[in-house]
Image (cartoon, rainbow, N blue to C red):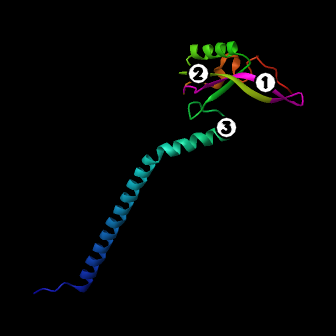
């Protein structure tokens, strides 16, 4: 019967302990990496949406197609049809709704005014930009601006 030297036995125990410690740390790192990968892939749509909103808020830019609808007022039905036709010919919208006779209130020269207008509603396509609207968007030349 042979006996193992006690120093040799301690050395073997330390070596086994180091190897098991290394393997357990390696397993933990791999598991955490896998969980991080799964979480990042599953949360991508939400993170993308938050990123778009932050970009829009910080830069003041408009991100079309991200749950947006454009509302355009025009003084009469013919002007609304002309604007709508120009938007459709440029393929900036799949459809445009022209709503008849909406009541509008606004300030003009310090007084509240009441008028009837035609309201146009359309969801812009993702490729379209507000600056590409007929007559430059924003101010179409159909109205004067007070102040």
In the picture of the structure, the residue carrying the numbered disc 1 is: 115
Which residues fall within the magenta stretch? 106-125
Q: Residue at x 40, y 58 (%)?
A: 32
Q: Where does residue 76 sit, x and y in percent of width and height?
A: 72, 16
Is tag 1's residue or tag 3's residue first in the polypeptide sequence? 3
Q: Please identify the quarter of the rendering in which residue 63 is found.
A: top right
Is tag 3's residue or tag 2's residue first in the polypeptide sequence? 3
Q: Quadrant of the C terminus?
A: top right
- Residue furthest to the left: 1
Q: Please identify the quarter of the rendering in which residue 4 is found.
A: bottom left
- Residue furthest to the right: 110
Q: Where does residue 129 sit, x and y in percent of width and height?
A: 61, 25
In the picture of the structure, the residue carrying the numbered disc 3 is: 59
Q: Where does residue 64 sit, x and y in percent of width and height?
A: 59, 30
Q: Residue at x 78, y 24 (%)?
A: 115
Is tag 1's residue or tag 2's residue first in the polypeptide sequence? 2
Q: Where does residue 110 sit, x and y in percent of width and height?
A: 89, 31
In the picture of the structure, the residue carrying the numbered disc 2 is: 96
Q: Quadrant of the N terminus?
A: bottom left
Secondary structure under the numbered disc 3 in the rendered image: helix
Question: Measured along the vertical axis of the image, is residue 30 above or below residue 59?
Answer: below
Left or right of 135? Residue 106 is right
Secondary structure under the numbered disc 2 in the rendered image: loop
């Amino acid at each position: 019967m042979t006996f193992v030297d006690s120093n040799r036995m301690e050395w073997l125990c330390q070596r086994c302990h180091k190897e098991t410690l290394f393997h357990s740390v390696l397993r933990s790192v791999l598991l955490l990496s896998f969980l991080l990968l799964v979480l990042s892939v599953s949360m991508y749509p939400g993170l993308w949406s938050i990123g778009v909103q932050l970009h829009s808020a910080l830069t003041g830019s408009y991100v079309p197609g991200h749950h947006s609808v454009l509302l355009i007022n025009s003084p009469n039905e013919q002007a609304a049809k002309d604007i709508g036709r120009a938007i459709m010919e440029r393929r900036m919208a799949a459809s445009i709704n022209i709503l008849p006779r909406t009541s509008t209130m606004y300030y003009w020269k310090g007084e509240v005014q009441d008028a009837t207008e035609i309201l146009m509603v359309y969801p812009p396509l993702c490729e379209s930009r507000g600056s590409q609207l007929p007559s430059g968007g924003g101010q179409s030349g159909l109205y004067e601006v007070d102040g």
